[in-house]
Image (spheres, rainbow, N blue to C red):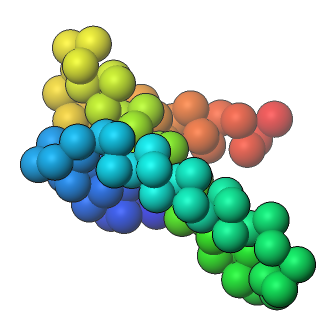
Amino acid sequence: MKLPLIKHIHQFVVEHDQDYVLEAIEVLEHISESAAIKDEELDVIGELISNMYGALEVRKLIKEGQTEKEALNAFMKRVVGSIDK
C-alpha cells in the first residue's frame, strides 16, 4: 500500500463520492477473474484494489471524528501491525 496514493484516492472520494471508488473496485475485481490476465497484471490490480479499500477506510475514520493525518497514521499502523504478525 502506498500512503500518497491512498491520500489521492481519498481526496477523490471527498470531491466526488465513494460510490465511484466502490464501482471501480467491482470492475477491477471482475477483470482480475479473467483467464487472460497475467500474474504481473494481477499484482497491479490487487495493489490498486488494496489502495482503494485503504482510502475508503481512511474516509470512515475521518467521518468518525479523526483528522485526516490521524486517520492515515492509524490506518498505516494497523496495516504494518498486521504484516508483522
Would residue 81 appear left or right of 35 to someone viewing this image? left
Residue occupying the far top of the picture: 64
From where the camera sits, is residue 7 visible?
no
Q: Position of residue 25 (x, y in %)?
A: 53, 53
Residue for point 71% across, 36% down: 82
Residue 38's image quarter?
A: bottom right
Compared with 66, 39 (above or below) is below
Q: Position of residue 24 (x, y in %)?
A: 46, 57
Query: Which one is in front, 38 or 10?
Result: 38
Q: How many dots with numbers?
A: 0
Would residue 35 appear left or right of 49 to someone viewing this image? right
Residue for point 21% across, 36% down: 68
Residue for point 18% across, 27% down: 67
Query: Which one is in front, 51 or 28?
Result: 28
Compared with 59, 2 (above or below) is below
Compared with 65, 30 (above or below) is below
Q: Position of residue 33 (x, y in %)?
A: 80, 65
Q: Position of residue 28 (x, y in %)?
A: 60, 63
Residue for point 26% across, 60% down: 8
Would residue 54 appear left or right of 39 to someone viewing this image? left
**Quadrant (top left, top right, bottom left, bottom right) of the C terminus:** top right
Would residue 42 appear left or right of 69 to someone viewing this image? right
Query: Which one is in front, 40 or 33?
Result: 33
Residue occupying the far left of the picture: 15
Residue 81's image quarter?
A: top right
**Quadrant (top left, top right, bottom left, bottom right) of the N terminus:** bottom right
Residue 60's image quarter?
A: top left
From where the camera sits, is residue 77 visible?
yes
Residue occupying the far right of the picture: 35
